[in-house]
């Protein structure tokens, strides 16, 4: 007993895309998670996009989102963005986090998201913009605060803008309160932001 | 931006191309503020490889038929400074809280307790764990423990295997431990005894490489300190997923004191110990 050395290197496990695709159907979620993480090839994108909303195990879904986000293409951005309207909070939050890490493809869909008739989708768009590394992110958030007709969206945009807030935003925030004088949460958000 | 800096003649566009390439290969991203650091090391690599320009060297690097070029680059650009018993409150947590829990659950699991140190750099971390276990963990005589160290940098791994350290690296090691486990091999240089060196298994791996990391499994404890801060969001997520896959359900993950998994991925469960936060791979589904 004591410290023991493992002399042999771990046995390399070589798995092709076919094996990994089959493994996506495994009843063991850890096996499905492993498959989702290993399916890095472009050819697996469609399958992962098809399954990301139906996979009910959060850790498997997170692995799918990690793999998909690495592609950072228009198809993946569009395929994921539809789930920002999902009733499943875990899915829409996971999708927002994945989209926020896709600076190449996501900016192209932001204008459409900001015009989405569902205000919950616009709230999620603010969440994406909070972490998206893009020079226009702050501008988009500013436009949301200035023009969006729903107070929850405006509050979310203020929240997302918090790390970049400066004195130049004071008038913008005060105007937002004036636009929604009966919304105590928005007033609280602005007061906290201006403190 | 097309400005060039002294030495490499690297233009802003070259730097961008290089940065994208290195990120895709390793998951490590350098901001413009690291330009001086990167330029200097690229310059070293170009000189060492015999090329006379960035363009020639970078072309050969991208072609990929000389893997030594990439390895030398990784060795130059990864930060490796560490010392024995660094942030040792986490080793206190290992001994006082984590290993007792691991032991409690081990009756169902055959084989040794497995501990992974990643990145292990020149070996100070996995060897520190070995010393703390041998000196302070009462169960070491009755339980088998496997310690593994891993790093992306082949040069530091070679130094870890040799395990020869200066006094600065050993400053936190109690003198009696130095006397017991190290041999003086030169002026101010001490080599760790073969009994410890030989007990720690070292591997070259990239934590962002899922295919390689898939071969690492069933660890009870993983130390992955002060590396995720170098990764961008996506690479951190992939590294977190790969670490998760290397751990048993219920296993423990230590990050550096300034790092937080909650900002990277929701797949681990934070557990508060008297010595700080540690992350666990959940034991059940959902």
Image: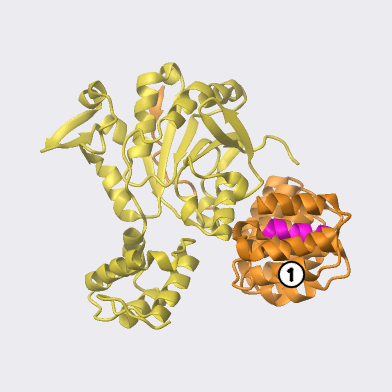
| Front in this rendered view, residue A1 or A157 | A157
Q: Residue at x 70, y 67 (%)?
A: A141
Left or right placement of residue B271 versus residue B68 in this view:
right
Instruction: Indicate the position of residue B18 as horizontal and vertical percent values.
Output: 41, 73
Horizontal side, residue A194 vs residue B193: left or right: right
Residue B50's quadrant in the figure? bottom left
Q: Residues within 10 Å of mark 1 (few under 14, many from 20)?
A: few
Residue B49 percent coordinates (x, y):
25, 72
Colouring rule applied to residues? by chain
Instruction: State left or right for residue B244 relative to residue B22.
Output: right
The chain carrying label 1 is A
- Magenta stretch: dominant SS? helix
Comparing A26 with B264, the one in front is B264
Residue B245 drawn at (x, y percent): 59, 46
The hue used for chain B is: yellow
Q: Is residue A142 above or below residue B80?
A: below
Q: Which residue is mark 1?
A: A46
Stretch in magenta = A152-160
Q: Residue at x 58, y 60 (%)?
A: B234
Q: Give the chain coloured orange.
A: A
As drawn, the residue found furthest toward the left would be: B187
């Amino acid at each position: 007993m004591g410290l023991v050395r493992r002399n042999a290197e771990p046995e390399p496990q070589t798995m092709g895309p076919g094996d990994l695709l089959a493994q996506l159907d495994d009843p063991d979620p850890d096996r499905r998670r492993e498959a989702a993480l290993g399916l890095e090839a472009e050819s697996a994108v469609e399958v992962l996009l098809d399954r990301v909303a139906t996979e009910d195990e959060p850790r498997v879904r997170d692995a799918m989102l990690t793999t998909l986000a690495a592609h950072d293409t228009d198809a993946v951005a569009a395929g994921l963005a539809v789930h920002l309207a999902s009733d499943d909070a875990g899915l829409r939050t996971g999708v927002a986090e994945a989209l926020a890490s896709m600076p190449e493809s996501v900016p192209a869909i932001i204008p459409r998201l900001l015009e989405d008739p569902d205000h919950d989708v616009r709230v999620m768009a603010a969440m994406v913009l909070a972490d998206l590394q893009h020079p226009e992110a702050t501008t988009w958030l500013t436009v949301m605060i200035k023009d969006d007709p729903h107070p929850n969206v405006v509050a979310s945009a203020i929240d997302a803008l918090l790390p970049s807030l400066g004195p130049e935003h004071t008038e913008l925030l005060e105007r937002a309160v004036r636009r929604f004088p009966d919304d105590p949460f928005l007033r609280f958000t602005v007061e906290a932001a201006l403190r | 931006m097309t400005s060039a800096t002294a030495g490499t003649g690297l233009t802003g566009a070259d730097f961008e191309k290089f940065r994208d390439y290195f990120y895709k290969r390793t998951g490590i991203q350098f901001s413009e503020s690291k330009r001086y650091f990167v330029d200097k090391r690229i310059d070293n690599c170009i000189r060492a490889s015999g090329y006379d320009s960035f363009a020639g060297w970078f072309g050969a690097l991208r072609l990929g038929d000389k893997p030594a070029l990439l390895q030398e680059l990784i060795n130059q650009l990864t930060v490796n400074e560490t010392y024995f018993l660094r942030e040792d409150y986490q080793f206190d947590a290992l001994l006082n809280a984590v290993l007792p829990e691991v032991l409690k659950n081990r009756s169902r699991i055959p084989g040794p307790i497995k501990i992974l140190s990643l990145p292990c750099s020149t070996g100070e971390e996995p060897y520190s764990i070995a010393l703390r276990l041998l000196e302070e963990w009462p169960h070491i005589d009755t339980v088998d423990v496997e310690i593994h160290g891993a790093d992306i940098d082949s040069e530091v791994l070679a130094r870890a295997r040799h395990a020869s350290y200066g006094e600065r690296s050993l400053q936190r090691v109690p003198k009696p431990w130095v006397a017991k486990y190290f041999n003086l091999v030169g002026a101010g240089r001490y080599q760790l005894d073969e009994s410890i060196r030989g007990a720690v298994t070292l591997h070259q791996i990239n934590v962002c490489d899922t295919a390689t990391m898939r071969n690492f499994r069933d660890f009870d404890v993983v130390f992955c300190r002060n590396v995720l801060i170098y990764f961008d969001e996506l690479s951190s997520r992939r590294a977190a997923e790969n670490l998760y896959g290397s751990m048993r359900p219920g296993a423990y993950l230590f990050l550096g004191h300034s790092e937080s998994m909650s900002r990277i991925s929701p797949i681990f469960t934070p557990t508060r110990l008297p010595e700080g936060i540690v992350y666990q791979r959940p034991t059940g589904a959902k």
